[in-house]
Amino acid sequence: MVESKSNDFMERIVSLCKRRGFVFQSSEIYGGINGFWDYGPLGAELKRNVKDAWWRVMTQRRDDVVGLEATIIMHPKIWEASGHTTTFADPMVDCLLTKKRFRADQIDPQSGVVYHFDGARDLRKWAPFMNKYSESMRESVTDHIKKYKTENDKGLTPGTADPDAAKNAAKLREIFDKEYHQEGGSDINVLAMGLANSEVAGRDAYSVLITPGKNPESARKVAQQFYQQRGVAEPQLLGERTEKVENSTRYNPENGSLLTEPRLFNLMFKTCVGPVENGETAYLRPETAQAIFAQFKNVAEVSRQKVPFGICQIGKAFRNEINPRNFTFRSREFEQMELEFFIRPDEAVEAICGSVARPAGPGHPGEPQANWGWQMWHKYWVEERLAFYESIGLPRATLVEYWQKPEELAHYARATVDILYKFPFSKRDAAGELAGEELEGIAARSDFDLSQHQRFSGKAMGVFDEELKEAWATLDESKKAALSECYFESRRNYLVKTNEPAAKAEAQAREEAAGLARGSYVPHVIEPSAGVDRLALALICNAYGEDTAPDEKGKMETRIVMRFHPRIAPVKAAVFPLLKNKPELVKKAREVRDLLRPHLTVYYDEAGAIGRRYRRQDEAGTPFGVTIDFDTLGEQGAELKDTVTLRERDSMKQSRVKIEALPALLLDRIR
Ligand code: GAP
């Protein structure tokens, strides 16, 4: 059950993934590289099955979606148009003590007492000046020297020398010579220089947060470490004072140290195109979507698709994440599966159909209809995507449909639904339930993307819609005016937001609104955007189970079983000869393997006791085991000849099946 899965559970998952070859740390032999992961033999099959399932559902089984495979490096202007160059950034902070980097918006708020320090004096440098004085005198002598230095500096500052301060300094010097000077001790000016020198390295102010229950001494220890790192060998903390704080995100949750001020960090990986070191700057794509927009006109033309239709793509994306974490969940290199589904603006739908259908209630809205506006299409894709996740084995109870709040939406988005999976490392809500982490976002992005590429490339991204042109001609004048005004408003809003001068935005929006009559508009888009790696991780977490099964001697033992849905299981069937030293069994088993192999992924295993072989396949998540035994050879009677034992992974149920019936039976179960 999802609820019982904890972070200790996550450790078991990570360990199984390495042991069984689902996921390895990238470049492991060199100590790994943070945020990068490799998929081993089972992981590679799992990912391929996930992508194949998505591709089949999103394009191969539809008339209205076509595929694209674009390059990872594209013209840098694409990222200017999309806004990534300027706004694809996360706020970053560093721990002033450990230098560990955090995303500022991911720091948990903390309350407690903050210990502030003005700086630190290096006792290793200062103590030799004080060795003429008793312990009890050192503090007052140091204070006196400090006061003298402050006044003396003010009295001597060229240009702004303060004669009163000079007088004070002279007085303090007199007092020092009378009351504090020691036989063989230094002159007050030498001491003042020594004091200044011992405070040079520790001039920075610093703070440490202590949460309730923690010893305040630990704040001082942390502060001393901080000053030691800055070259203060033996820090004596200066100017300590405390302050109560509530829900502060300014301190490192791991050690209480003050963090740097947040600064924005662009997540795109930069590279250089061309054979010279400082050739043209380009970027590794941070999402696959933009290539779809950039190729929209080409694809629409060659595929002879008419709006509404979609273009989908699966491919690598790269983000220089500040804090890669939770195993593969937040990586720096990952794969996306994205669909851009282009639709008519609502004004065009209304012109053609007389009205725009809107969602009537919860649930799937059914087969697409001509009168659907963006809300119906958005709802449709949310429901389709949820159905997809269920079809590959993620129970509905493990998924959350999260509607972004208006203040969370990008300025151009009309609605965004995130589909979350209740990962074991998810935060918990007020009721203690796993809140879930994002698997996919389904955004209604208006006509922002194509409009941006139209603006930046100077190439028209609009379409001609014959149906609209014909319908428009039949509308009465008041309807035409109302729809034009609506379209004009939304185009003008877009243009103003992109900083076009008001008059220019108005004129251009008028011209575009007039285009409706000619059947022309820039399509709007609904974007379901999913991550392959996050989905693979969700499937692994969901599949993991531990139960008991009998060993060879019938004794119950704990088994790890990966209950993948047969549709995405890395290996569909394992074929075992009962004994490997019986050539007739081995020959027959290889025949069965070769019979199945053209249809499904088969693993042949003849090594070890049959129970152990079953257990290995349970861990790999293989849903079916096929055992060839002496009955198969007809030794127990002709009626069992050419039958095999079919074992089901989850129930461990065994049944007798004719070899010739196996391909159809298994295909039926894995499709
Ligand atoms: N084109 C829209 C877009 O890229 P996104 O929410 O930034 O939207 C879409 O990314 C999906 O890509 C996410 O829901 C997630 O599954 C996946 N994804 C994003 N960043 C990721 C990362 N650092 N590691 C793994 N997957 C990531």
Image (cartoon, helix red, strand yellow):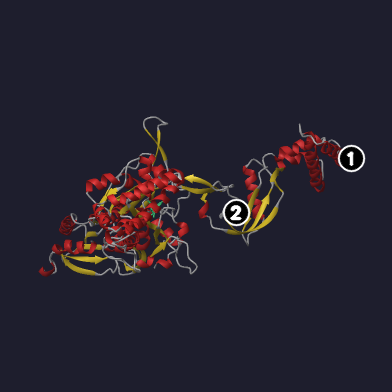
Q: Residues within 10 Å of mark 1 (few under 14, many from 20)?
A: few
What's under tag 2, amino acid-wise? Gly
Identity of the residue drawn at 29% across and 60% down: 617
Marker disc for residue 12:
none
Quadrant the N terminus occupies: bottom left
Q: Position of residue 68 (x, y in %)?
A: 28, 47
Circle on res. 178 = 1
Residue 669 versus residue 296 in the image, above or below: below
Quarter occupied by residue 607: bottom left
Identified at 44% across, 43% down, the residue is: 85
Q: Earlier in the sequence, mark 1 or mark 2?
A: 1
Pointer 2 local density, CA inside 10 Å: few below 14, some 14–19, many at least 20 = many
In the rendered image, the residue lying farthest to the right is: 178
The residue positioned farthest toward the top in the image shown: 276
- What is the x, y in percent for residue 172? 85, 40
Locate the C terminus by quadrant: bottom left
* Residue 235 in sight here: no
What whole-number distance in Å separates the C-alpha atoms at marks 1 and 2?
46 Å
Measuring from the top left, give residue 435's x and y in whole percent: 45, 64
The secondary element bearing badge 1 is classed as helix
Q: Secondary structure at mark 2?
A: loop
**Vertical placement of residue 24 versus 363, above or below:** above
Kind of residue indicated by mark 1: Lys
Question: Residue 341: where, in percent of width, then height?
Answer: 31, 54
- Residue 132 found in image quarter: top right
**Is residue 45 in sight in this rendering?**
yes
Vertical arrangement, residue 308 with respect to residue 169, above or below: below
- CB contact under 8 Å: marks 1 and 2: no
Foreground residue among 373 and 671? 373
| Of 473 and 93, the residue lying toward us | 473
Q: Which residue is mark 2?
A: 256
Q: Nearer the viewer, residue 56 or 30?
A: 56
